[in-house]
Structures are given as structure tokens and as C-alpha cells.
Amino acid sequence: MTSTNPIYSKSEVYKVLEQVRDPEIPVLSISDMGIIRDVLIDEKKINVEIMPTYSGCPAMDTIAADIENTLHVNGYADVHVETVLTPAWSSDFISDEGRLKLREFGIAPPQKNAKRGSLFHKEAVTCPQCGSGHTELVSQFGSTACKALYKCEDCLEPFDYFKCV
Amino acid sequence: MSVSVAEMTEQDQLFEYTVRLGDNCVILGQRLAEWCGKSPVLEEELALMNVGLDLLGQARMLLDYAGKVEGAGRDEDKLAFFRDAQAWRNLLLVEQPNGDFAKTMSRQLFFDCFQFLQYQKLSNSADTKLAEIATKSLKEITYHVRHSSDWVIRLGDGTEESHQRMQKAVDELWGYTPEMFDMDAVDEAMLKSGVGVDLKEIEPAWKKMVEGVLSEATLNFPELTWQVRGSKEGKHTEHLGYLLAEMQFLPRAYPDANW
Ligand SMILES: [Zn+2]
């Protein structure tokens, strides 16, 4: 598993991977999303391990293809992308920078270390437009699996909330 | 599978067990997809498609694993598209037609609560792959339970008509629920080896969960006046055949079709 005599450096591969965007939320790179579990380098072979956000997320196939293409374009020929389920991806893996980018994009970022396991609890979600905490859940499910639909009672704007999982 | 459980190897049992889990997800996911383009409101269309997509994702992981356990060269697509009704192992509940929105939500509530409790236990399975899949899926199922519970409460505790239709939907599906907790020889064997879940053990928790939602919805907890079972032996209601005909048509007519 460890890289013996790597010709490539792991940090350089990570740097290239920052160019790969989440196709459904293009302001975020897959590094911001925290879906890269590890990069394993064995001589010239590169194995990128990714954690799927949702089981049925249609973006995962695109992301895997984009990782391969981006690394190829940057001179890495032998690339494999592997999907791993452990640890199960959590919205806590989204970086602080990613949270900032989400808010700027108009998506309320997921709360960190949110209470889980409890089935029914109300989350306090802040409006990404005006900062009001006076918001209401419209639907548990938004335009993609990872988002819920909210509306702000103060500025009256509807907005997406990136769900806690 | 026509071999008796006594003749089944451990590998056969694990395959059978995993296929049962996967088949529930395929069939309910397919049923939810039938709402595409005809849901009551846009938000609900998105919600139903998202839940269906989660189920399909879970199904892919489970059937992919089942195929590997079997080792006969069948992948997730082969298992989904090239098995006839009697080879399917999904619960009778999930193959029931959508009916009106109340019926869809009633079916969903019963299954979501069941899957939630089942996967909670399964996430501690001695089989690492099943434990991983359950852990991952549980995050999604939590949202499914909230969604179906919300709707059952909203419709039950809604207008006179929505209340009456919600009660009817709950009553009509009730007889399909006892089957969920049946333990056959495969279940017993899987439980013994630490892989499977004791379904009898989760039954009281399920009843409590559903009862809580129904009472908040001002609905009556139904009385069990009839019940059917048989999916573990491949005996299904007449509805499954039609569902499969639609779902399997394309890959069977054009076996080499590709996206
Ligand atoms: Zn606002």
C-alpha cells in the first residue's frame, strides 16, 4: 500500500486534483468536497480513492472520469480511480474553504458535527443571502440528492441547504 | 434458486441474503421512478426521484456484491435485467402499485422504518461489505424516514378527504407488513454466523415507530385481518411481472445496448 520509490509526489497529484470540480456544484473542487480519501502511488501507477457522497449520486461516474482525464492531461498515464465506502463520506469532510465557497454561491453550508442518529430534529439553517436565521424547510430533497430546499422568512428568497449526512 | 436450504453452501446463503436486500431497493426504486413527470408538485417530484435514486444506488452496491459472492459472472445488470419474477426476492410490499400519493407514502413509511431498523443492525454485520453498505445507506434512509413520516402526518392530520385516503392506504397495505419479519432458514443461518439481522427482534421497534407516526397523524393503527407472504420463495403478487416487463424490456430486446 505504501509508495515505494515514488517517481511522482503525492502532493503534486493532490494539487492537480484541485482542478477537478464537482459537476453539480462547480464552485467546489473535489478536494473542497472532501471526497478524496487517499492517493496511492506505486512507481508510475496512481490509485485515487474516492468516497461517494450518496449511493446513487450520478455525479460520481463523471467525477471518476474527470479525475482520470485531468491526471492524463497533466502527464500521469497510469491512473485508476477506486470507490471506497469506508469511512462513509460525511458532510463534515467539506473543508472550511469549501463552506465559504458554498455560501458565496448561495448554498447554505452544512452544519459541522450536527447531531446525528436522532431521526427527528429541526436544524437551524442560516439564509446565505441575508444571514437571517429565520428560515423554513420547504422540502427535504432539493435539486440534487445532497441538498434540501429552504426559504428565508426575512428576505423571502428560496435557497438550497447542503444537507448534513 | 431451487436447491433446498440444507443443500446450500454458506456462499449460496450469503448470495441469497444479499439479493433479498438488493431486490427490495431495485423494485421500490423502480416504483418511485414511475412517479417521474406526474408527481403532485415539483418539490415532491424531486423528493421522490431522490429517494428512488438513493435506493437504486444501494441496489447497485448490493447486487454488485451479490454477483461477486456468487462468482458465476453475473454482474448487477445481469441480476437486475435477466431474472424472471420467481427469481426475485423483494418483499411483496415494495412491488405494490403506487396507487394515489397516500398509498405511495404509506408503502414508503412501512419500508423506510423497516429498512432503517434493519440497516442499523446490519451496520454491525460480521460481513464487512454488508456492514459498509448499511452504514453508508443509513445516512440516506434517515432522510427517507423523515420524508415519509412528514407526509403521512400531513395527510392524516389534514383535510377530511386526505385523512380518509391516508387511512385507507394504511389499511390496504397492512397485510403485506408481517412478511417483513419472517425468518426462514437462510435468515437463521445468516444470523447465526453474525452476518444477518434478527428480524423478529426489530418487529416491536418497527411497530412502535409506525404507531408513533400514525397516532401523530390521527390515524388508527390497523388491525391485522389478512396477511400474505411468499417472496422468500419467489412467490409474488401479480404486480411484479408487469413491473419487470417494463424495467427489463430494453436490455432484453437489445442485450448489447450501451449508454
Ligand atoms: Zn434571507
Image: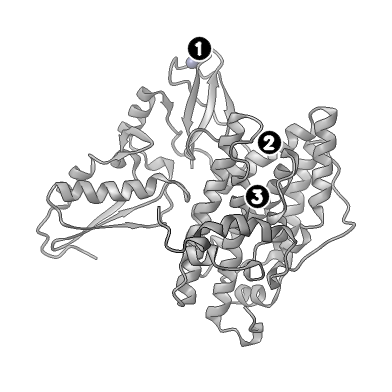
- Identify the secondary structure beneath mark 3: helix
Residue tagged 1? A155
- Identify the secondary structure beneath mark 2: helix
Residue tagged 3? B112
Viewer-proximal residue, B27 or B156?
B27
Mark 1 Cβ and ligand 1 under 8 Å apart: yes
x and y percentages locating residue B132 in the rendered image: 47, 60
Is residue B25 something one can see in this rendering?
no
N-terminal of the pair, mark 2 or mark 3, is 3
Q: CA–CA distance between discs 3 and 1?
A: 35 Å
In the image, residue A99 above or below residue A136: below
Say if mark 2 contacts mark 1, CB within 8 Å: no
Q: Please, which chain is the residue tagged with disc 3 on?
A: B
Viewer-proximal residue, A156 or A71?
A71
Residue type (three-letter) at the residue carrying disc 1: Cys
> Which residue lies most toward the front here?
B253
Is residue B186 something one can see in this rendering?
yes
- The quadrant in which residue B81 appears is bottom right
Residue tagged 2? B150
